[in-house]
Amino acid sequence: MSGDFVSRLPKIYGMYTGGFLLFVVALAIAEQMGLPNAWIGYVFMAATIGLYAMIGIMSRTAETDEYYVAGRSVPALYNGMATGADWMSAASFIGMAGTLYAQGYDGLAFVMGWTGGYVLVALFLAPYLRKFGQYTIPDFLGVRYGGNLPRTIGIICAITASFTYVIAQIYGAGIITSRFLGIDLATGVWVGLVGVLVCSLLGGMRAVTWTQVAQYIILIIAYLVPVVWLSIKVTGNPVPQLAYGEVLQQIGQLEQQLGVTAGHATPFVKNDMVNFLALTFCLMVGTAALPHILMRFFTTPSVKEARKSVGWSLFFIFLLYFTAPAYAAFAKLEVYSNVIGQSIAALPGWVASWTQVGLVSVCDAVDAMTTVKGCAVNGNGDGILQLAELVLNADAIVLATPEIAGLPYVIAGLVAAGGLAAALSTADGLLLTISNALSHDVYYKMVNPNASAKKRLTVARVLLLGVAAIAAYAASNAPATILSIVAWAFSIAAAAFFPALVLGIFWKRANKAGAVAGMLVGFGLTLYYLINVKFLGMTPWFGIKDVSAGIFGIPLGFITIIVVSLLTKEPSQETKDMVEDLRYPKLAKG
Amino acid sequence: MNNPVTEERRKEYWRRTLRVTAVLLSIWFVVTYVVIFYAVELNAITFLGFPFAFYMGAQGSLIVYVVLIVFYAWYMNRLDREFGVAEEG
């Protein structure tokens, strides 16, 4: 990639953004002229996936540096956008506002956790990892602690965390395709899988980077448009983030009328304070430990750019995250004021469409618990929809709000395209992490150091297809909402990697035995807790829920590394010199 | 700028790095955990039309995070130049 290409980037992405907006406007006009809703859905899906595939093909590569780290030439601003898309998954796009809708203040643990974690990335990891300058996180563990054992454990942890995470992305893509192509959820998951593979199999960090920048632009437009529209409609103020304070007050009044005792902004209703604190902590530390995010900071040209790039990343993420609570508030206002209290017979079309996907249930019937899927209570059968009779799955809120609020269908299609971009971009990054771990760390570094680059990639792609298929199978059984699946991945990564990475940089005395023990203990304890509490009915310790499993594993990982390191031999002078070198962007040879 | 950096200067650079890291981390801790810990009390205050704890969780703390990272990048780049360890020399 030449400097010429970099200097043309603003023009390329500027034209791309303009083109996308024109495309949306054209579809809006077509809708007014009578294009059926179903077609709008098809066109959005086909056009955006086709676009990503095209970018992928145009920037595919077989050079090692380009394939693994995009030639280390991605400017901070674009790396920020790519990291934003890589980061913001189906959970952020679809799940978060839905959770905020359902839980009010208590959902803010996700908003704070997923932004505050970048402070840890900036202060503890990004500049040092960039200085280290290899290809993957297991690379770092392998070099810093020496030998194949730390590398192998790193690989296992990276694959476990990424795999858990990718399930959620494929499930999210499945929800969207199922709703907008009118197929059932299980089939939708497989269609979503094809969308993911089209992008990621084409290959390489370079292809994924430039696709992710394109996906970021679509997802942020798709997220902001409906909220700005609602904000103007409800409050007359085009800046929803400023305007929704007033909406919160209106919600408070409606809550009183509807007999809701715990208001939207009241803390610790659905989640007690201990769990809220623990979840925020796990999400933050997890952010600073997810391999698919950390490896993005290997792609910048310098340490200086890496530091700057964390700032841009968080800024682009922040744009969506500080909008999510506004999105939730406007959605709640629409539902409370326009849906609740309607006659069942007169409910708008979106109710039926979403009921079909299984994410909305209307429980007015007196025997609703047995006759209607998804109802936890029986209704009163009066033909009017009461608050308790409407079951809205959190994952449906973002996608359904444009329809609930009666916005043109093209907005619903736009939001779906944005959600798909979020799910696909994250899935790409994750599959690339898994594929790099398999081809670079396992096959090349451990099995066959003489393998040609081409052979390594072929091996990775075959394995990748298998991994993706297993993930899709798991997703089609949808074991929990997107947000909790993702939260598990954070706890796993946090406990496995964070202590070993941070101590590896900041404490020269940390050695191989300590790191191996610490990673195993952190990873093992977290997995043990999660599985036992979630699936085997173990009584939680101190009432900590499974999503915050890492709260035990993270400190124990630190303690284990410190204790075991001190009990065993000091690392070699060579290793200490390497750590010393990490701390300075450039040392003149003396 | 190609003079080797003395051992002492290096130590000083690292000491200042650790200091700025600690300071920024403390601010991060306060706007996250202290604010959550006192959420019920802080919500009694209204800020820009929002209950204050809700505002912090939804916007305020996020803005502080962005500022912390931008400040760190700025401060460290300056420090690199001051101690002659910047990449551009």
Image (tube, rainbow, N blue to C red):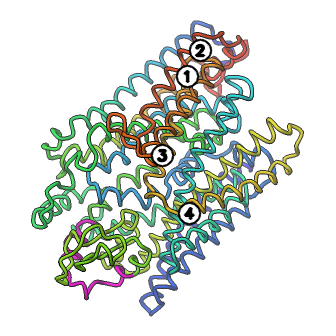
Q: Which residue is mark 3?
A: A488
Point out the tag, 2 or 3, that comes first from the N-terminus.
3
Q: Which residue is mark 4?
A: A14
User: The disc numbered 1 marks a residue on which chain?
Assistant: A
Q: Which residue is mark 2?
A: A565
* Label disc, if present, on residue A503 of the rendered structure: 1
**Mark 4 vs 3: CB contact within 8 A:** no
Identity of the amino acid at label 1?
A: Leu
Residue B86 lies in what quarter of the image?
top right
Looking at the picture, does residue A34 appear above or below residue A276? below
Question: Which contiguous range is marked in magenta?
Answer: A332-352
Identity of the amino acid at label 3?
A: Trp
Look at 54% across and 76% down and name the residue there: A44
Q: Residues within 10 Å of mark 3 (few under 14, many from 20)?
A: many
Q: Evaluate whether residue A99 shows in this view.
A: yes
Look at 57% across and 16% down and name the residue there: A564
Point out the tag, 4 or 1, that comes first from the N-terminus.
4
Mark 4 and mark 2: span between their CA atoms? 52 Å
In this view, the residue farthest toward the top is B8
Identity of the amino acid at label 4?
A: Gly
Which quarter of the rendered picture does the C terminus of chain A lie within? top right
Kind of element beneath mark 1:
helix
Point out the tag, 3 or 1, that comes first from the N-terminus.
3
